Amino acid sequence: MNKMSIHDVDVKGKRVFCRVDFNVPLEDGNITDDNRIRAALPTIRHLTERGARLILASHLGRPKGAVVEELRLDPVAQRLSDLLGRSVSKADEAVGEEVEGKVRDLKEGEILLLENLRFHPGEEKNDPDLARAYAELADLYVNDAFGAAHRAHASTAGIAEHLPAVAGFLMQKELETLGRALESPDRPFTAIIGGAKVKDKIGVIDNLLEKVDHLLIGGGLSYTFLKAKGLEIGQSLLEPEKIDQARAFMQKAADRGVNLVLPEDVMVAGEFSADARAEAVSVDSIPADMEGMDIGPRTRERFATIIRESRLVIWNGPLGVFEFDRFAQGTFAIAEAVADSPATSIIGGGDSAAAIKKSGLADRVDHISTGGGASLELMEGKVLPGVAALNDKG
């Protein structure tokens, strides 16, 4: 990574504005999964142990520029305090006189958590005045919010125009892990691409076809590829306007010597329902009144064989309707193959991360990204605004 990190700066006595991603799921005001808070702990501990006066900032949910009481960060402050075993102050605003006073009172090693940044309409618009107000609170900016790095917001991009800007440990790990995999992959390199729609994965598939040895395609988007091969797909999810794109990808794979593998059998059902009866059929005999909901047993075995023989596996997107237990078997089988494989395994964030966690195999893969959209854009070869804003080394 050619960006400066918190290793490269002295923080003692400095006011450090650290953007974290504490966008955790809440139910009735209780945090149901605190992994994102835990992921930021190494950076937080490093900064406080070295005498930083630490200002933490995050968004939570989508309040759309207005105060939403249920999306205040008080439960986050409490959980962070529990995890660190020390007190964490909480501001009722993100900027303003109250915040300025609390920052002035911060002693070395103390922590202040600002209120939900997205209560301000200027946050998501990258409002220059708001960015300047954030910057005036601090002497140094640290971005450890990989999950928001693909957004050019006031707290991820604008603020960095006014302060020295460096990466936290989580940001550094995400960039180095994905960067190394895409730039100098161990081979054979296999990518597994699932999810519902081709249109969401065009950039990723296009970029990966330049790099991989095997591209395994499942999930809802695979039916558009099957249709592009001339197969009848019944009531399965289809993007008619993306058939030509799918055909072009298959041609590109052939031209580049990439083994692009589509399902050979699928689990079909007569309705989109958790209780629907599942039946395995070959992809060339999908009944006209049924829809594909998951990859079938032969496909699972074929995918698993390729995964077992790989040295690097990147996975983005579930291979079936994994929210329904009956149609999660394909995704879980592939999760098991990835966990059992000697390959270095990298799981894109979002649904892929949720699927691997639901399978109970999360501790047996090498890296689960904390950012769905951000990891997707890195895989597309894009420069993330939150990363571009950081100071270069040297």
Image (cartoon, rainbow, N blue to C red):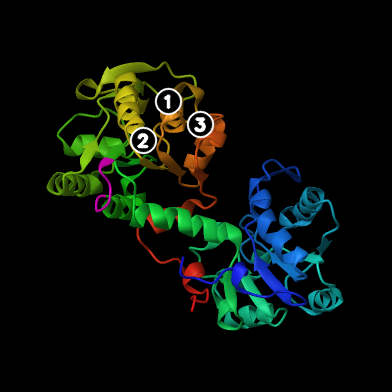
> For the residues marked 3 and 1, what is the alpha-carbon distance in whole angstroms?
15 Å
**Quadrant of the rendered image containing residue 379:** bottom left
In the image: residue 138, left or right of residue 168: right
Dot 2: within a 10 Å radius of its alpha carbon, few (fewer than 14), some, or many (20 or more) residues? Answer: many
**Disc ID at residue 219:** 2
State the residue in front, 137 or 108: 108
Residue bounds of the magenta highlight: 209-214
Q: Earlier in the sequence, mark 3 or mark 2?
A: 2
- Residue 74 coordinates in the image, percent (x, y): 79, 55
Q: Which residue is mark 3?
A: 323
Q: Secondary structure at mark 1?
A: helix
Residue at 83 percent of width and 51 percent of height? 85
Q: What residue is rendered at 35% in x and 22% in y?
A: 267
Percent of width and height locating residue 96: 77, 78
Q: What residue sits right under mark 1 in the picture?
A: 333
Rendered image quadrant of residue 358: top right
Based on the picture, tell me whether residue 211 belongs to the magenta stretch: yes
Amino acid under disc 3 = Glu
Residue 283: quarter of image: top left
Cα distance between the residues tagged 3 and 2:
12 Å
Image coordinates of residue 183 in percent, x first then y, are 34, 57
